[in-house]
């Protein structure tokens, strides 16, 4: 649940911009002590501060809408006031978490691990384990997703953020790795398990 603050500063009223995904709701808090306000997204006006928060609200999303997009709304009481809500695709893991086979010491074709959310991303909890064909662990560690592999951000043709795995794996075996990611709007994706088999050159 996100909060939109209505603020008066130097006699100018602003509606705080927020970024959400399609699953999220939000509410308004009027911090303006001088006037009531009535954002068009809610059914009742908010009195001057201190005033109770609004009810929950959502951005109407057309069925054919691609992400990200920005929705602009107005105020029913003051025609010169408006605000924006940016809607991004939900941050989620790729459908296929087992990547294409790769060859040791050869650059892989970058592959999507997750998509959606609001960049920039912060990665944490990176762990990896490499096993041989017998299932024996031959290398493991933290702070990366495996020797020669890394995470980066790209964008699809609609502008949706995509977290990519790329690089040149230097060890033969099956890479099993995981990571967590948090975006700039505090959406979070926790410890999805990924796998990639790297064959000897």
Image: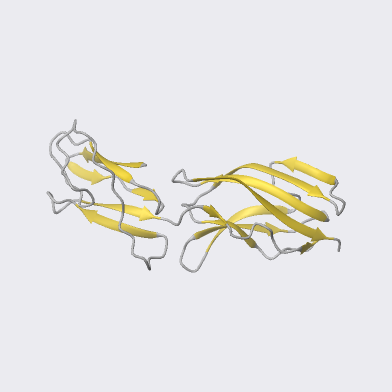
Which residue appears at 22% of the width and 48% of the height?
42
Residue 155 to residue 128: above or below: below
x and y percentages locating residue 179 in the rendered image: 63, 45
If the image is split into quadrants, where does the C terminus sit?
bottom right
Residue 105 to residue 185: above or below: below
If the image is split into quadrants, where does the N terminus sit?
top left
Does residue 19 show up? yes
Which residue appears at 29% of the width and 42% of the height?
27
How many marks do you count on the picture?
A: 0
Which residue appears at 48% of the width and 52% of the height?
117
Q: Is residue 130 left or right of residue 63?
A: right
Foreground residue, 3 or 32? 3
x and y percentages locating residue 151 in the rendered image: 63, 53
Does residue 145 show up? no
x and y percentages locating residue 76 in the rendered image: 14, 51
The colouring scheme, among rainbow, by chain, secondary structure or one colour, is: secondary structure
Q: Is residue 1 left or right of residue 7?
A: right
Q: Is residue 40 left or right of residue 144?
A: left
x and y percentages locating residue 122 in the rendered image: 55, 45
Which residue appears at 46% of the width and 54% of the height?
90
């Amino acid at each position: 649940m996100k909060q939109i603050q209505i603020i008066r500063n130097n006699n100018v009223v602003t509606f705080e911009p927020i970024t959400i995904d399609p699953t999220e709701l939000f509410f308004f808090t009027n911090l303006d002590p001088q006037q009531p306000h009535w954002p068009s997204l809610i059914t009742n006006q908010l009195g001057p501060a201190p005033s109770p928060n609004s009810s929950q609200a959502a951005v109407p999303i057309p069925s054919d809408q691609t992400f990200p997009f920005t929705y602009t709304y107005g105020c029913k009481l003051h025609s010169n006031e408006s605000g924006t809500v940016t809607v991004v695709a939900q941050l989620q893991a790729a459908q296929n978490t087992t990547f294409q086979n790769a060859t040791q010491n050869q650059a892989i074709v970058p592959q999507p691990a997750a998509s959606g959310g609001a960049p920039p991303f912060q990665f944490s909890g990176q762990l990896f384990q490499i096993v041989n064909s017998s299932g024996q662990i031959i290398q493991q560690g933290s702070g990366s997703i495996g020797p020669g592999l890394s995470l980066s951000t790209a964008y699809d043709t609609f502008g949706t953020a995509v977290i990519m795995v790329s690089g040149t794996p230097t060890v033969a075996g099956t890479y099993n790795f995981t990571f967590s990611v948090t975006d700039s709007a505090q959406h979070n994706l926790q410890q999805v398990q990924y796998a990639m088999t790297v064959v000897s050159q």
